[in-house]
Image (cartoon, rainbow, N blue to C red):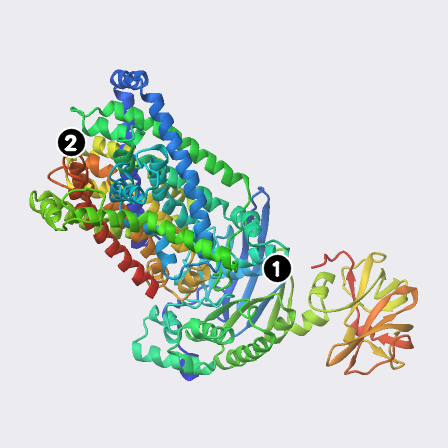
Amino acid sequence: MTRVRSPFAIAVGVLGLLTVVLVGYPLVRTVGGIAADGPTFGAAALDVLRSSNLLPMLGSTALVLVVSTSLAVVIAALFAWLSERTTARLGWLAGVLPVVSLLVPSIAGAIGWVLLASPKAGFVNVALRELGLPIVLDVFSWPGLIGVYTLYLVPQVYLPVSAALSDLDPALEEAARVSGRGPWRTLVEVTLPVIRPAILSGALLALVYGIALFSVPLIIGTQARIDILSVEIVRLLTTDFPPRLPEAIVLSVVVLLVLGVAWTVNARVLRGGRFATIGGRSSGDRRIALGRTATVLARAGMVGYLLVAAVLPFGALVIVSLQGFWSGRLTGPLSLENYADVFGSAGATLAGLRNSLVLGLLCATVGMAVALLLAWRIGRGGGWGRVLDATTKLPGALSHVVIAVALVAAFAGPPFALGGSLLLLVLAYLVLYLPQATLSAQSAFATVGRELTEASLVAGEGPAGTLRRISAPLMTRGLLAGWVFLFVLVVGDITASAILASTRTPVVGFVILGLFQNGTYPTLAALGAVVTVVSSAVVLTALAIRRRR
Amino acid sequence: MAATAVEPRPDEAEPRGGAPSTRIAVHGLTKTYTRRDGTTVRAVDDLTLDVDAGEFLVLLGPSGCGKTTLLRSLAGLEDVQAGRIELDGRPVEDSAARVRVPTERRGLSMMFQSYALWPHKTVAQNVEYPLTTRRIDRPERADRVRTVLDAVGVGALAGQYPGALSGGQQQRVALARSLVAGDGIVLFDEPLSNVDARVREQLRAEIRRLHAEIGFTAVYVTHDQEEALTLATRLLVLREGRIAQSGSPAEVYLRPTDAGVARFMGAGNEISGVARGDIVTSDAGDVVGRAMPEIAEGTPVVAFSRPETWCFDPPPAVLNRWTGTVAGTVFLGSVSEHTVVLPGGVRVRVRTLGATGPDVGAEVEVGVPADAVRVLAASGSPS
């Protein structure tokens, strides 16, 4: 059937084409580069394979990721269920819980945990010593590293799972209750199996995010002498001169292979089983009543998570940032000297903070607008829709490091010459977080009933007008949630920033890395605290707007 | 109602084909689905249909008969594989000429099963919406919105959001929105299936009244035969994507052309046997009826009749009469239904007004006039 193409459809088509080019070109060029310069890459591959620390590094990376992803899935599924489906829900905190560890950017959170649980001077350990307890919490250890990883992987699983749970038809659970199952057996036998696709995609997102996670292994893993792949790739690109691009790409291919396998397994599982269609009905107040003890335990668990994920690390950052030096004690003269230090000495900090804030607002807004249009096109189906669907998810299947490297290879040199420019950072952030953006927009679309848009079309409003007047206003909540997610990810980004930013174009991640290498803990803490406050302010404002709608 | 009554559509083209009074012309429409296992389902199968101005056409059939697919194809909400649709003589769908006018340019109105009221717009804004795309100036729009809201009895709710309304009120607002555009074509997709019986009855009566007042052309989908009989000026029974029977409500109810339609339209007494002209030879003896012309001598048939056409102690002119035993009685309010066992073990139902009728176990005379018995091929698939 031929259709008359409206200007709107053409514009969206062009946007889709641009997206495909922006995502595809760097990757094709990078892979093409490997093919074109075989001997160099062959030598690099041999170098990498022969190096004695390859296997231990891959092993420890796998161990950390597997354990922390599993823990994150358990914690996130449990909390999401408690929040969405039971009476143990913690009021307004339930809205913050899923993103709470994102309020403290991972770099600040990692530093916060060093301040809390470093064996000698950590606040927790000093306190334990003073109490005379022979226990030492060592963050520079396998459990320490895995624990902090887990904190940052929980939101990745939490968001898709809680979305699926809030859309779940409560009748499915009620049917299990009527059939004689208690709340816990209902959870295990009915609820979790029904939302298995959401859990799996959450686990995959967590794995993808975890492989790219750089700040936590850099700050904690390095001192714990645990080698992690993402740190190694960034090291090859930034500390060695000239940058060892071929080696980095070879390691990136390893990442790609692992994620490819995970992606395939995920797709296979989803295709194999048939899952109950989740109805659009909202569950309203039909929640499962938990007993008194269970409620107290569940709420204590959620509050505990809140403390561990955000309140404690942030508190440690604030205290140390006000002290002259880090002693692990709460006493001592307090001053704002560190803040003056960080922001006074070099202009880079303030510029970095400003750049990150602007980039965060810009990329979140542009990203969600683009995602809205792409999701609209994907929703119309057809071959091109499927191509767009796959393309927009592709960055999620690739390590951020791979993408950043590919973007450098493709756009830094001629003819684009974008190396070290803010535009390259904008492009990088948009590409990196395209999967999160389009997934949010697509799930927001799914909440708008089909008949609502059809009624508008029948009333004579075209697709563009229907999107503007009906779909978009009804999607506000979902779009805002996606916006918050994007903003936090961009402001807290450190992987792309480490590779793509420069002293001419500093961003928060870049400045923090510099301080980590050359500065003191109190100055790091000061910057971490400021970043946390700024990003929390934006996030909480957005969440407040969202609740008011 | 004057303001809503006679506004011509701005996007109405001059009629080109068909009689001027034909508003919807469907020719050879085919829509197939491919199931997950690869089999193909013909939801609408080479269907041809005309709807005249002012008609209230009801599409009736069991679920899966293709009635909703047909309606959505008229609105351009389904991709059809073959066929042609003309609205007011303007081709909007023509697979041969590769024509497809998008939904928003077909100038239709539609009332959806789920109300489909936009929760972020007030009642008045919801109803005004179809007018904002039709280049009508603001004061007139407000005027028409007020008129139509008053006409459906929710004028006082204009400033409310749909979330604050009851189901019945939402339904009325949805009705107002589908009628606000004037005397156009209005499609109804099982709009009353979500409200309770009392509200449903009220709204049926109002749709009838508004149809008489405004004179719109309606295509109405339902699976409820009572609703179909109440509303239709013409009834179309669909089965497996094809038209099983078309006619006035009385025609379809009283003179069904096959057993499937007969059963779908309501309760019936079926006496199986073999055809011999207008006579059916059955276990209960001969039954005289009116045979469909295509029925051959000696083929298996059913003698089909409605329970309310049967009576106790029939007058002498009634040819079909038996002596039977009352096996049971059900009181249904306005009528009572008695099950009577005829000779040969044939069971029939007989209706009497109110709580009257013979006692259970009594021996009774029952009969049915030959005019009320249709002789139909036994192979009619049950629907």
Q: Nearer the viewer, residue A484 or B179?
A: A484
State the separation of the CA atoms marked 1 and 2. 63 Å
Tell me if B328 is positioned left or right of A26 in this view.
Answer: right
**What residue is shown at x 56% (from left), y 55% (from top)?**
A172
Label 1, on which residue? B63
The relative height of residue A176 versus residue B359 in the rendered view (above or below) is above
Label pair 1/2, CB-CB below 8 angstroms: no
Q: Residue furthest left?
A: A345
Label 2, on which residue? A414
**Looking at the picture, how far across and down is residue B23, in whole percent?**
49, 68
Q: Nearer the viewer, residue A423 or B300?
A: A423
Tell me if B313 is positioned left or right of B383 in this view.
Answer: right
Kind of residue sitting beneath label 1: Ser
**Looking at the picture, how far across and down is residue A245, in whole percent?**
23, 25
**Looking at the picture, how far across and down is residue B339, in whole percent?**
83, 71
Tell me if B242 is positioned left or right of A450 in this view.
Answer: right
The relative height of residue B105 versus residue B148 in the rendered view (above or below) is above
Kind of residue sitting beneath label 2: Pro
SS at circle 1:
loop
